[in-house]
Image: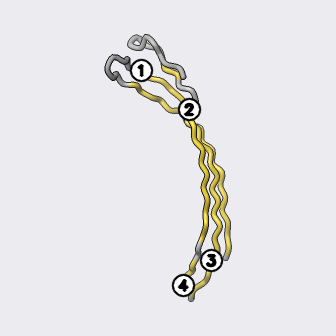
């Protein structure tokens, strides 16, 4: 009993961030996008042991890359200098 499983994943999700007041800084809110891509692979083989047992050793590998898009803060009545990265 042999088998292989492969999977490719891609996610792009928006994220809202809130910046609190620290010292003399001003509060703010902004948004960005979080990106993730990955590949997963698994190989296995099953050995029948008796009538009810199966020994199935496997090997797998996973590779994932993530990142964040540019950040843009919104200008409001309390935020005079929004940050854009």
Q: Quadrant of the N terminus?
A: bottom right
The percent position of residue 72, horizontal first and vertical second, equals: 52, 22
Q: Which callout, 1 or 3, points at the residue further toward the start of the chain? A: 1
Give the label, 4 or 1, closer to the camera.
1
The percent position of residue 83, horizontal first and vertical second, equals: 49, 19
Question: Count of labels shown?
Answer: 4
Q: Quadrant of residue 33?
A: top right
Residue at numbered disc 2: 33
Q: Judge whether 27 appears above or below 38 on screen.
A: above
Q: Which callout, 3 or 4, points at the residue further toward the start of the chain? A: 3
Circle 3: element type: loop
Q: Which callout, 2 or 1, points at the residue further toward the start of the chain? A: 1
Q: Which callout, 3 or 2, points at the residue further toward the start of the chain? A: 2
How far separated are the C-alphas under marks 1 and 3?
A: 56 Å
Q: Residue at x 65, y 55 (%)?
A: 7
Q: Which callout, 4 or 1, points at the residue further toward the start of the chain? A: 1
Give the label, 3 or 4, closer to the camera.
3
How far separated are the C-alphas under marks 2 and 1?
A: 17 Å
Q: Are marks 3 and 2 in contact (CB under 8 Å)?
A: no
Circle 1: element type: strand
> Which residue occupies the extreme bottom position in the image?
50
Q: Judge whether 38 appears above or below 61 on screen.
A: above
Q: Classify 10 Å Cα crowding around label 2: few (below 14), some (14-19), many (20 and above).
A: some
Residue at numbered disc 3: 46
Q: Judge whether 4 appears above or below 71 on screen.
A: below
How far separated are the C-alphas under marks 3 and 4?
A: 13 Å
Q: Are marks 2 and 1 in contact (CB under 8 Å)?
A: no
Q: Classify 10 Å Cα crowding around label 4: few (below 14), some (14-19), many (20 and above).
A: few
Q: Judge whether 77 appears above or below 9 on screen.
A: above
Residue at numbered disc 4: 52
Q: Which callout, 4 or 2, points at the residue further toward the start of the chain? A: 2
How far separated are the C-alphas under marks 4 and 1?
A: 61 Å
């Amino acid at each position: 009993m042999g088998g292989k499983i492969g999977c490719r994943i891609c996610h792009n999700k928006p994220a809202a961030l809130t910046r609190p007041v620290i010292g003399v800084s001003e509060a703010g809110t902004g948004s960005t996008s979080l990106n993730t891509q990955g590949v997963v692979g698994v190989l296995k083989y099953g050995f029948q042991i008796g009538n009810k047992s199966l020994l199935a050793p496997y090997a797998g590998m996973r590779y994932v890359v993530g990142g964040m898009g540019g950040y843009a803060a919104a200008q409001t009545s309390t935020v005079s200098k929004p940050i854009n990265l």
